[in-house]
Structure formats: structure tokens, C-alpha cells
Amino acid sequence: MCAWGYAGPYNCLSCYGCMESCDHLFFHCGFSRRIWYSVILDCGFSNPPFDWDSVVVWCVAKLKGKSLKVCLAKLCLGACIYHLWRQRNALLHGNCPRSEEAIVSQIRWEVRSRILARRSVQIDDKDRPLINFVAACSVVFLVAGLGLCIQYLLE
Ligand SMILES: [Zn+2]
């Protein structure tokens, strides 16, 4: 941001502990790391990386194919980036910031909605624990998610 002529503030607006940078925002900052870990662990991944270069390498290595796990992780990563940047801008411009829990809930809801709208996701037996992630939001989503899963299992 400094290279683009941005005049500050330069410290992270979420924790005020470090200089703002891509690495800090995605996901060195405790605020962003807790959000990233919350949603990516839900996808069935363990020990996800938390520095940007490693996240990129990890995505190239781990997020191949169209399985439910991979689709969830891709959607979660995109949603994390979007909401963390949105949060940063809300803090910068004095808008009401959201709590970690609110952002995680929003990401889960959006990912769930998007995955239920897809027809090309491959769901198999090893993805059964992930179905809870997809369908646990409400009775409506539970019914819709199970219906979708049954449809895919019968195909
Ligand atoms: Zn921070």
C-alpha cells in the first residue's frame, strides 16, 4: 500500500501490533488467522499454513479436483480474503467492524449457500463428515443439503 502512495495508517487495524502487509493480513494477524483456521478446519484440513506464500503453495498442492472438500476449501479461502479485506476497509473508514464470530458465521453461510447451488460437486462416502458443514446451518439447509447429497449419491 505504501508503494501505491497510501498515506496510512500503516499498522494493522485489527490488532495494532504489526505493520500492515499482505502476509500480516493473510493470515499472520491473530484476528485473520483465527477466522482462516475456523473455516478451513471445518473443511477437513489440518495444519493449514498461515503465511501467504505457503497458502499459495498449499492451495496448488492440495486443492485439486472437484471433491466436496476441495470445493469447500476454495470457497472458504475466497470468502476469507473477501471478508478480511472488507473488515480492514470498514476499520479504515470508520464503519462498524464485525466480530470474528460474525465473520466466521457469514463465511459459513455463504459457502453453504454456494455449495448447495452447485451441481458439479463430487460427494462420496469420505465426504460424509463435511456434509454437516454444508447442512448444519438450519433445518432448511439440512433438508436441502441432504436432498442434494441423496441426489448425488443416487446418480
Ligand atoms: Zn493484525
Image (cartoon, helix red, strand yellow):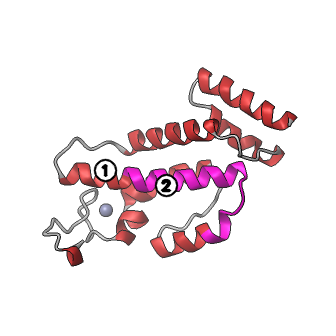
Q: Earlier in the sequence, mark 2 or mark 1?
A: 2
Towards the viewer: 121 or 129: 121
Q: Give SS at disc 1.
A: helix
Question: Residues under labels 2 and 1: Cα distance?
Answer: 14 Å
> Seen in the image, is 155 located left or right of residue 108?
right
Q: Name the quarter where the C terminus is drawn.
A: top right
Above or below 3: residue 92? above
Question: Residue 93: image x %, image y %?
Answer: 17, 50
Give the label, 2 or 1, closer to the camera. Answer: 2
Disc 2 marks a residue whose amino acid type is Gly
Determine the residue located farthest toward the right in the rendered image. Answer: 154
Which residue position is annotated with label 1? 87
Q: Which SS class for mark 2?
A: helix
* Residue in view at x 67 percent, y 36 percent: 132
Magenta part mainly helix, strand or loop? helix
Residue 48: percent from left, percent from top: 57, 64
In magenta stretch: residue 111: no
Q: Give me the disc on residue 78.
A: 2
Q: Which residues are magenta?
A: 60-83
